[in-house]
Image: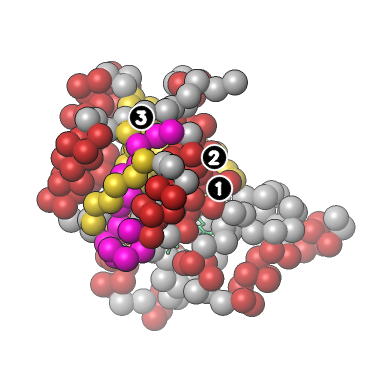
Amino acid sequence: MFTSIKGRSVIVTGASKGIGRGIANVFALQGAKVMVVARGEEEAKATVDEIRSKKGIAEMQLCDVTDWEAVEEMVTATESEFGSVDILCANAGIFPQTKIFEMDPEEWDQVMKTNLKSAFLCVKACIPQFKKKRNGRIILTSSITGPVTAYPGWSHYGASKSGQLGFMKTAAMELSKYGTTINAVLPGNIFTEGLQDLGQDYLDSMAATIPLKRLGVVEDIGNAALFFASDEASYITGQTLIVDGGQILPESLEAIEEI
Ligand code: NAP
């Protein structure tokens, strides 16, 4: 039985949709106070309403995670609403698919800013909170794409997701003196609005290559994040957890057909 995280304060970036929304719901169900962060008001409010309809505690803060002042404001707002920040789930991300030859340099920068620089900004902004309490938990949503696998069109995305892990390792060392851990969840293919935009053919072909024969659900990632946030995970830092239904295991097409 894990120690309850009831009453702890958690920031979830990119919580208006997909995986972030799943993480927010999983934490709220365990009694955490959830700050829902995204840019779009209507969808962020929908997540807050969903959590409140299940008697959970949630507030929202509209914030572009690439904007340092907005990120600082996100932390200030969470502290004034909930009294502290105990857990940061830096999850917001984008995954436009463009091959290198066709990619504008601006698209590269946008992906790097949204997926990698934002992790640095959110962690930096939360440090004073963790320092004060000499305790804290950070969970990054990375990906199998980049750190483990590759897919045409996602060179910038893969670089940003691998970059998160490089950042995480040094952050784990720097934050250790504040009793704070930082770890990353590496999702495989999780059924979200963002993934749906890639089309049904993509979804069907992906499901066929996964040993468990289905895409993940957002709660699969929420539960992994919840584990890293738990008291029982307090001795784990700078580590990764792949949550992919076994997707990275098959050595060949034949291997998957053998199942
Ligand atoms: P999604 O459905 O497209 O949702 C993305 C979320 O991020 C939305 O809430 C979006 O809200 C927010 N966001 C995007 N840019 C932002 C910005 N600049 N500032 C603040 N919020 C921003 O995506 P998802 O599939 O849930 O993916 C979530 C994370 O998981 C990403 O980091 C992604 O790389 C990672 N991931 C996903 C999968 C998958 O299979 N789905 C696999 C591996 C890793 P607004 O647009 O309103 O701001």
Residue under the point 85% across and 55% down: 259
Helix, strand, or loop for circle 1? helix
Q: Which residues are magenta?
A: 31-45
Q: Position of residue 238 (x, y in %)?
A: 42, 31
Q: Which residue is mark 2?
A: 223
Is label 1's Cβ within 8 Å of ligand 1? no
Within the magenta stretch, is there residue 234? no
Q: Position of residue 190 (x, y in %)?
A: 57, 57
Q: Earlier in the sequence, mark 2 or mark 3?
A: 3
Q: Position of residue 114 (x, y in %)?
A: 30, 58
Task: Identify residue type, mark 2.
Answer: Asn
Closer-to-camera residue (75/114)? 75
Q: Position of residue 102 (x, y in %)?
A: 39, 81
Task: Identify residue type, mark 3.
Answer: Arg
Q: Which residue is mark 3?
A: 8
Gap in angstroms between the C-alphas marked 1 and 3:
19 Å
Question: Is the N terminus in the top left, top right, bottom left or bottom right quadrant?
Answer: top right
Helix, strand, or loop for circle 2? helix
